[in-house]
Amino acid sequence: MRSSWKGCFIKNKERLNNSSTLLNTMLKKKVLVYDGKSTKSLLVERRMIGLKVGEFIFTRKVGVTHKKKVINKKGKKK
């Protein structure tokens, strides 16, 4: 927990990182966020104020599930 006398953490206002805090001044604006590999844009909404940027940017790929190939009685694949 960050002490209150230090204020909110923002490293760079133009290009935020995941540990930056979203402020009231950023409301309804698009900000650029670096997730470690690429830069993504994020539109700041009222419910996001006071939280960290990393809670809204996903850094992992979503896994793709493959269907099993069904084999006929004759041994041929469909």
Image (cartoon, rainbow, N blue to C red):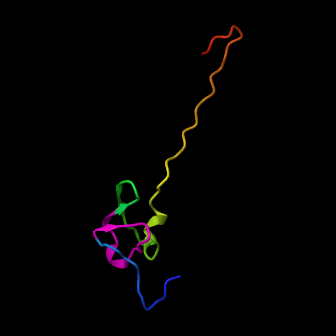
View extreme (front): residue: 36
View extreme (left): residue: 14
* Residue displayed at 49% across by 88% down: 3
In percent of width and height, residue 13 lies at 30, 72
Q: Nearer the viewer, residue 24 or 20?
A: 20
* Residue displayed at 65% across by 20% down: 70
Q: How many marks?
A: 0
Whether the magenta-drawn stretch holds residue 6 is answered as: no
In percent of width and height, residue 66 lies at 58, 32
View extreme (right): residue: 73
Q: Which residues are magenta?
A: 14-32
The answer to whether 42 is drawn above or below residue 12 in the figure is above
The answer to which image quadrant residue 73 occupies is: top right
The answer to which image quadrant residue 24 occupies is: bottom left
View extreme (bottom): residue: 5
In percent of width and height, residue 8 lies at 41, 81
* Residue displayed at 68% across by 10% down: 75
The answer to whether 35 is drawn above or below residue 52 in the figure is above
